[in-house]
Image (cartoon, grey):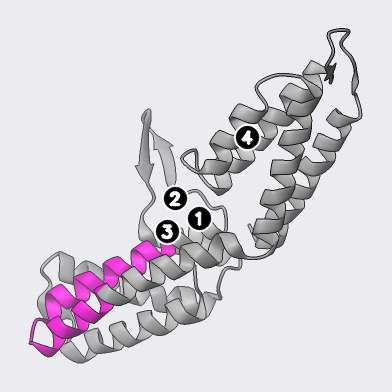
Amino acid sequence: MKLDVIVARADELIVMGQQVVATRRSSGYGSDVVESAPMKGFRAAVLSFIDRVYGRDHPHFSEFEVSTNDSWFYNAEHGLAIVKSIRDEIAGGWLFTIRGLIAAEVFANFLEMAEHLLESGYKDPAAVMAGSVLEEHLRQLCKKNAIPIGEQKNDKQLPKKADRLNAELTASTAYSKLDQKQITAWLDLRKNAAHGNYSAYTAEQVAQLLVGVTNFMVRIPA
């Protein structure tokens, strides 16, 4: 799911909120109210949206949840204002920019450590570390594109394998099929390193892995 699709959904929620506000009427108790059924629908839809985009721990979720816990007119007004603010934040690129900057800094540190390991003659842990950074970057890309990183199996929520994430990101046009093939090769190298198949690759290939993963993350940021 692309950024414009997320913004479009936020626009739909704004329209929904405006429709709720339009049901304003006097309660007879000094404060106006809105129709409770549309208000509940608006509240549920927005909370689901915030949970999916930001997560339940984000201040947007708690702020909206508290501000819309009744059907007073001011509850609807406050809820609508929060959705408009969220919409502007997402459209301005702040959601993914901040996440991406933090992740990029962390990943750069790990890749630097992997490079140091390789230069010290430890190609195998360097390959594992670089592959782990790549896999986590794929997970971050999935979150950016609203692709679930887990799946339900036997009543348990399990993380999807990196190859599956790679395929789903390609299908969502997050990057090209050529990128997918290259990532598959990198993941295979990491798998060989993690499983002790150290003769299946060379130090030169690990060096290429480090350069390739770094360039990929710069070109396709999360």
Q: Residue at x 60, y 28 (%)?
A: 66
Q: Which is more N-terminal, label 4 or label 1? A: 4
Label 1 Cα crowd, 10 Å radius (few <14 / some 14-19 / many 20+): some
> Which residue is the extreme one toward the top?
28
- Disc 1 vs disc 2: Cβ atoms closer than 8 Å? yes
Residue that label 4 marks? 64
Compared with 201, 191 (above or below) is: above
Residue that label 1 marks? 143
Label 4 Cα crowd, 10 Å radius (few <14 / some 14-19 / many 20+): many
Q: Which is closer to the viewer, label 1 or label 4?
A: 4
Q: Residue at x 74, y 48 (%)?
A: 84
Q: Which is more N-terminal, label 2 or label 4? A: 4
Q: Which labelled disc corresponds to residue 34?
A: none
Residue that label 2 marks? 149
Residue that label 3 marks? 139
Specify the amino acid type for callout 2.
Ile
